[in-house]
Amino acid sequence: MTAEPDGPEDRLRRFATIWSRAVFPVTSTSLTRPELEEQLLPLARRLSEALRARSFEAETPKAVGAALVGAHCTDPDALARSLDCVDAYLVLYCGEDGPQEDLRTRCSRLQHAMAAGFAQKLRERTLAEQEAIAQAALRAQGVVAQALHASEARFRAVFEGAAIGIGIADLQGNILEVNGALVRMFGGGEQAVRGRNVSEWTHADDAPQVWRLYDELVRGEREHYHVEKAFYRPDGTVLWTNLTVSLLRDPDGQPQYQLALMEDTTERRLLNLRLRYEATHDALTGLPNRTLFFERLEKVLAAGEGQRFGLCYLDLDGFKTINDSLGHAAGDRLLVEVADRLQSCATAPGEMVARLGGDEFVALTTGPDTHREVDDLAARIMNALVAPVRIEGRELTVRGSIGIVEGPAGEHSPAEVLRSADITMYRAKSAGGNRFELADPEADARAITRHGLTTALPAALERGEFFIEYQPLVHLGDGSVRGAEALVRWLHPQHGVLGPDRFIPLAEHTGLIVPLGRWVLEQSVRQVGHWRERCGEPGPLRINVNLSPCQLTHPGLVQDTVDILERAGVSPEALCLEVTESALIGADDDLLKPLRRLAEMGVDIALDDFGTGYSNLANLRRLPVSVLKLDRSFTQSMQQFPADPVDLKIVEGIVSLAHSLDLAVTVEGVETGAQAEQLRILGCDTAQGWYYARPGPPDRLHELALVDATG
Ligand code: C2E
Ligand code: CA
Ligand code: CA
């Protein structure tokens, strides 16, 4: 039992354990470590879900950050340790087999959102505390005023025992009384406060209203005010306070004293600054992060008439290869070096560099004349990357692709601008990389679907957005249904049903075709198993599944296929794999080996789209192929009646050659009865096309086959 591999739940639990161990030492709770782990487990689950969610959504990780504050993990170290833990282990334990690159980017965004949520929650809590203190201050004012008139002793008790600093001054600002807490805030020396005048306590960071409110109060025009104020301590350090000042009147109602209540917020303020810094900067490179960049871009785009912006979106070429071959540590050092170089490119006022995540950076320039400036900026960046980077004794050449967007403020949202830059960068990359391209709205529109579809593909497979339609294969001799070809479709949440021509090339390009193809094979084989159980006549149904060239070269092809057949309890004879002619042209023995092994097991291999490539017919002999699928173009030429005699001759020739090589011939794209008849006369064995049925749900085929068998 112990040898069983961990399930997702076990891994999630392991992550929560590690997390609890990391933060437990710095929490201020009465919980035990295992109890804390129980509290962190649901948070871990939410992070894990957010990591793998279809689209990034900051609310969940923000809520997790906030929940940390709720769980008494308010120490800044608790946040830092949590972020470290997420950084090091979340993808490892909860990333499953998703694309690592995307998961890493997603993971760093999660951390930023977590930090932001943490900071925000802490701020809210601070505000709530301040509110409570202000309430207490008002109550204290009543008590103190009373005490002043009543008993000096009782006043002393309230005054000295208070945890917050209390001071009393006359209306000229001379400080008459201070309590111990206040003295301690100023560093402990009585002389630092007693006997001084309030007016000496100006500070460079005083908000403009601080002294206006003070004047109003001492003139008797206001009863109290509340501000945040800094003071210099005698040792030169700064004390930050929440200051509440109230006017004390004598029994006749005449202004007499001012009473100050102050709470030391220095620590909390530093913490907030640090949190703000952490939430807005990239831990690896120290550059502003996505959050800060968005804030900045938002401001820039909201600027008035005449203001323009220019943005360079940089993505390193081949960074993944470096990371994979030299390791993450080397990858990190490269990123730090690149960050430093970028920073030195954008030093003018109005310029900024940020890291968006992974190997993506942005440089922003603003002002009235960004048109020229942004080109210069991009050129400077390309230049800065020219010199190789030395890491671990190697000289690494760094290249990048830049997408440039430039324009007037006030026309687009930050997200639109960034997307446009991203697409443009993608265009620069597809053109070979190591270059910059300027955004072009028309090219963008064309690229959007392509780019959008590509990025949506992996999640689409996880979310089950693909489905398969089956198109019957009919025996030309007796018209019976012999099987079907599986044709995959994508039910895209925005674009509706997309045909394979829209996304198969993208899936091939990104490598997703391997898991997608495996999924299609698995579904189709299971489906043919069901059909075979339900209708035996007139002969067992078979399934044709398309294979992309990339699947052919994938080392797991044979084993995966064997496993899939075994698991579904379907014999190899029920399966026909379709490979395009072009994929096998010039194929060497290595490439053919897996196909040959499958053919030896009894799987049929069909040469798809035959006649579109230039395979030497004699060459067919050395391919492990048992079916020729004539391309639709042959059928199309038989649309007219009578058909072109030359075409007929060609097809006749192919059919007789195929038969002499023991190959069956299937024709595609049969749309009319006349075509079907013609092809039958020419000796073709099976046909497929709209004349018989369009591709459709699996039950349709079952019905067709059944009608056949009974009727
Ligand atoms: P294909 O293998 O040549 O598939 C036949 C295509 O012809 C299908 O288009 C089918 O819907 C269409 N068709 C069928 N009968 C007729 C007809 O009478 N007239 C006309 N005009 N067309 C007909 P579909 O479904 O758009 O598939 C396009 C291509 O996508 C397929 O061409 C195949 O190469 C590829 N494909 C489909 N599913 C998969 C898959 O699961 N894996 C891979 N690698 N490729 C797939
Ligand atoms: Ca096919
Ligand atoms: Ca075909």
Image (spheres, rainbow, N blue to C red):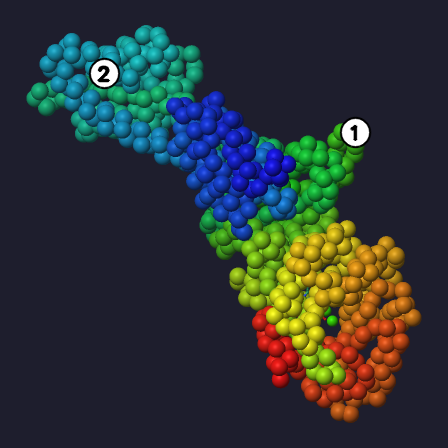
The reply, left or right, for residue 417 in relation to residue 148 is: right
Q: Nearer the viewer, mark 2 or mark 1?
A: 1
Considering only vertical position in the picture, is 95 above or below 403? above
Given residues 95 and 286, the one toward you in this image is 95
Given residues 614 and 11, the one toward you in this image is 11
Q: Amino acid at mark 2?
A: Ile
Which residue corresponds to the image point at 30% horizontal and 21% vertical from the top-left? Answer: 262
Instruction: Find out if the beta carbon at label 1 lies less than 8 Å from the nearest ligand 1 atom.
Output: no
Q: Which x, y percent locates residue 537? A: 67, 76
* Mark identifier at residue 168: 2
The answer to whether one can see residue 676 in this image is yes
Q: Amino acid at mark 1?
A: Gly
Given residues 254 and 549, the one toward you in this image is 549
The answer to whether one can see residue 373 in this image is no
Mark 1 sits on what residue? 393
Give the distance between the C-alpha atoms of the residues marked 2 and 1, in whole angstroms: 68 Å
Q: Which x, y percent locates residue 557? A: 75, 54
Mark 2: which secondary structure? strand
The reply, left or right, for residue 250 in relation to residue 415 is: left
Q: Which x, y percent locates residue 359? A: 65, 41
Which residue corresponds to the image point at 20% horizontal and 29% vertical from the top-left? Answer: 222
Q: Where in the image, quadrant-wise, is ligand 1 located?
A: bottom right
First reached walking from the N terminus: tag 2 or tag 1: 2
Residue 179: image quadrant is top left
**Which residue in the rendered view is the most extreme toward the bottom?**
642
Which residue corresponds to the image point at 32% horizontal and 7% vertical from the top-left? Answer: 191
